[in-house]
Amino acid sequence: MQNAAWKVSPERSIDTTVRNSLVSNLKSIPALDVQITCVLGDAEGFGLASQLKDIFEQAGWEVKGVNQAVFTVPIKHLVLSFGKEPSRELQRTLALLFDSLGYPREAGLNKKLSENMLKIIVGSK
């Protein structure tokens, strides 16, 4: 039933308890530079991207974005790219984010990014 309700819900939102947990956990992890991008013209995705920006900024991380871009292939949910292998603590913290949204974990390394960079793409629902 919860899954059906999620599909009908017009906007994705990060629960206050999850938000507070993310901010607390991120504060205890060495900060990365974060770049957040969403699909051009997707107001709902922009809203989620803005929530993510607020969470990382509240934790003291530097955030560039929310940028908007056109993608040649459809982007769904969240896609994370790291400049280097993320710490176990960061992986656990970000797993909480994916789990709270009901998403499969989609993350990988991108050699084109600096080692201190986390790139988040917020795709469509």
Image (cartoon, grey):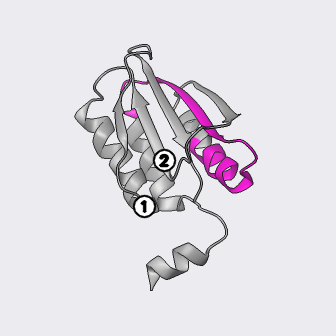
- The magenta stretch is 27-52
Q: In which quarter of the image is the N terminus?
A: bottom left
Determine the secondary structure under disc 2: strand
Horizontal and vertical percent position of residue 47: 68, 51
The one of 46 and 22 positioned closer to us in this rendering: 46
Task: Indicate which disc residue 100 carries.
Answer: 1
Horizontal and vertical percent position of residue 7: 55, 74
Determine the secondary structure under disc 1: helix
Q: Distance between the residues labelled 2 and 1?
A: 12 Å
Does residue 50 appear to the left or right of 31 in the view shown? right
Amino acid type of disc 2? Leu
- Determine if residue 23 is in view: no
Task: Indicate which disc residue 109 carries.
Answer: none
**Which of the two discs, 2 and 1, labels the residue nearer the N terminus?**
2
Amino acid type of disc 1? Ser
Does the magenta portion include 34? yes
Residue sitting at x 74%, y 53%: 43
Horizontal and vertical percent position of residue 13: 59, 61
Does residue 80 appear to the left or right of 76 in the view shown? left
**Looking at the image, residue 116 lies above or below residue 5:** above
